[in-house]
Structures are given as C-alpha cells and as structure tokens.
Image (cartoon, rainbow, N blue to C red):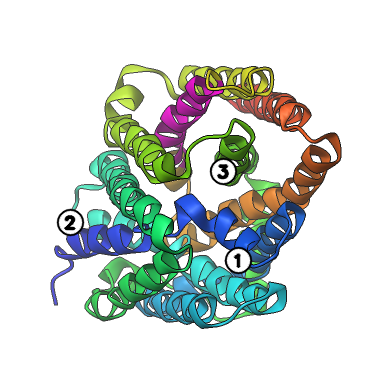
Amino acid sequence: MNVENNIIKMYYLKAIQWFMVAMPIIVLFFQDHDLSLTQVMILQAIYSVVIVLFEIPSGFIADVFERKNVIFLSTIFSFIGYLIFSFFSGFYYFAVAQILVGIGGSLISGSDSSLIYDTLLELKTNEKYTKIEGKNYAIGNFSESIAAILGGYLALTSLSLPIYIQTAVLFFGIPISLTLVEPSINKKNRVEKSIKSMIDIMKFAIIKNKKIRYLILYSSIMGFATLSMAWFVQPFLIEIHFYLGYYGILWAILNFTAGITSYNAYKIYDKMKSYNLLIFISLIMSISFIMLGLNITYLGLVFIFLIYLIRGIVTPILRNEININIESNKRATVLSIRSMFIRLTFAILAPILAYISEINFSLTITFIMMGIIVGAVSFFSLYQLKKID
C-alpha cells in the first residue's frame, strides 16, 4: 500500500482530535459538577501524570512496532474516556476518564509526527516537514476554532451538550486510523524489543546528546506556558466577567490566530536563524505573561493573543529542530520524551499556580510567576544551546 495518503489522513485525524467542542467551557462543565478550580487543575495534573508515565513507553512501542497501530489504539482510548465524561459525574469518575484520555494522548504523541516525518523521508520530501507540520498544527487550530464557536453556543443550552458532541466526533478517528500505512523505513530500522533499548534512547536524549537535551528543556517550558494558558483562559474570563455566550467565539479567534502563525511558521523559520527566532519567542512569551498578570482586565486579552500567536510558531519549529537531529528508529521515543517533560512540568506547576490564584483571589501573581519561570528556563536553555553551537 502507498504511504502518500498518510499525510492527508493525518490532517483528518488532527481535525477530529482537535475538534474540541467542549474545550471553551470545560472548566465551567467541571465546576457545574461541583468541582473547585484546584480540583479542575488536579484533573489536568492527573492527565499530565498519565502522559508522563505512558509517554516514553508508548513512543518506544511505536518505534518497535508500527506507529499506525499505536495511533489506532489512541483513538480508542480517547473515545472511551469521553464516553465516561458523557454519562458519569463526579471527581473520581472524571479522574478515570482523564486517565483514559491521557493514555490516548500519550499513544498518539510522538507517533503522529514520526509517521509524518518518515512518510516524507520515504517520499524524499522531508525538507518540507516544517511546512507540513505547521499545516497539520494549523488544521488542528482551525478545527478547534470552528468547534469553539459551536461549543460556546451549545453551552447556553447545556454545559453537557458539548461533551456529547465531542464524544461522537472522536468516534470517527477510529476508522481513519485503521487505514494508515506504515512507512517502510520504520519497518527496516526498528530498535530492539527490550527495556535496555528504551533506556539507551532515553540516555541518548537526556544525557549524551546535549543539543537534544536543551531543545527538550526549551520545549518543556514553552509547552508548559502554552498549555497553562489554555487552561487559565477561562478563569481569566470569569474574573473579568466576560459574557458566557462569547466564550466560544473568543476561543475560536484565539485558535484561529495560532493556526495562522502555525501555517506560516516555515516562512518565519526560513527567514530567521533558529537561535534568534527562539530568543524572540522567549522574550514575547515571558513578557506577555507578566503584562497579563498586571492587566486582569479586557486589555489583558491583547497579551493572551500574543501568547497564542507564539504558540502557533513554536510547536512546528521545535519539532523540526528535534527531528533533524535524531535517527528514524529513535524518533517517536525522543519526541515522546519531549512531550513527557512538557506534561511533567505542567503536572507539577499547574495545581500550585491554581492554588496560589485561589488563596489570593486573583490571577495576577500566578501570571507574573509564570512569566518569570518561562523566561528564566528558556533563556538558560538558549544559553546552553549557544555554547554547544
């Protein structure tokens, strides 16, 4: 079977995976089921811990076996998780659902980008990866934008209705994933099926290869920043008394903004040296968080938009930087290590930051702390990368 159609199928899967009708109101949905903001962040921490625990094994499984099979399992777990959200209630049921969705997320993380990159390698067009990954990420953001508008209006009728729609949409990812074709390069160069092989790849990424190590560290803090922003947008909107009926529209505009920059990330990447671009990203991201903390008003929306603009650029660029520095038979595992560190950082810091916002009855200190943390870690990483080059 031909691998050429893999790219378009991955586009479809991204559109389905990111058609998150529930996302604009998910915090409200949880709070409507009597969960506090701290419990909501604990649920997200549980999701992140599951990602941490399963991320590297799932990437290794994808390198050892076939990535398409791992992606198929991902669609199954995510669908079952949302079935539980749809028909059960309470913190503990939601925790189980988060675990299943987390397993689904860890299975596809790394496997999707690896399948795309190896497909392009087989087609001898891997120089287009940043463009393809940017387009893939943009499709996800555009899909989320459309879903957000729908979700915001559905929420006016019922906060549960977007969850039901999300569950139905996720089902369609299952048959699409079944039709993916494994690139021959992964079939020929698989790593040994052993724990030792997995540990060796982890040592390579975290200890032996300094460039990969600091690219992963930089990715971790940027991933934490963008992921945290996604979850703190709704508490911010609540604090400024933003009208519920406009939540979906705002969420759509934010994700459309990220989609535009993601779609054009390869052009920015071609025009600027990667190191200079990463410096620019660090400055904008850290300053935006600090300014957001000082402006818990409608003016703060400007800085949220800036964060989403950077979000669209940073993901495809960092994935490409990692891909070009690793071999095919390590790719899914290394990308999974990257995702693991993003989730681990979020799992540790997000509940703490949420708790700080609750005891101070304000998001001001939380956002300022996020800006300082993002700036300090990202510039340390860039300093180390500069020494290597």
| Disc 2/disc 1 C-alpha distance (Å) | 27 Å
Q: Across the whole image, how many numbered discs are drawn on residues?
A: 3
Rendered image: mark on residue 123:
2
Discs 3/2, front:
3
Amino acid at dot 3: Gln
| Disc 3/disc 2 C-alpha distance (Å) | 43 Å
Residue on which disc 3 sits: 234
109 in relation to 315, above or below: below
Q: Position of residue 270 (x, y in %)?
A: 30, 24
Amino acid at dot 2: Leu
Pointer 2: residues within 10 angstroms few (<14), some, or many (20+)? few
Q: Nearer the viewer, residue 167 or 15?
A: 167
Which span of residues is magenta-colored?
Answer: 300-318
- Asked where in the image residue 14 lies, by quadrant, the reply is bottom left
Give the mark nearest the N terminus, 2 or 1: 1
Rendered image: mark on residue 233:
none
* Residue 71 appears left or right of 5: right
Q: Position of residue 213 (x, y in %)?
A: 64, 43
262 in relation to 84, above or below: above
* Residue 213 appears left or right of 331: right
Element at badge 1?
A: helix
Element at badge 2?
A: loop
At a point 50% along the width and 66% down the height, the residue shown is: 105
Pointer 1: residues within 10 angstroms few (<14), some, or many (20+)? many
Q: Nearer the viewer, residue 336 or 344?
A: 344
Rendered image: mark on residue 56:
1
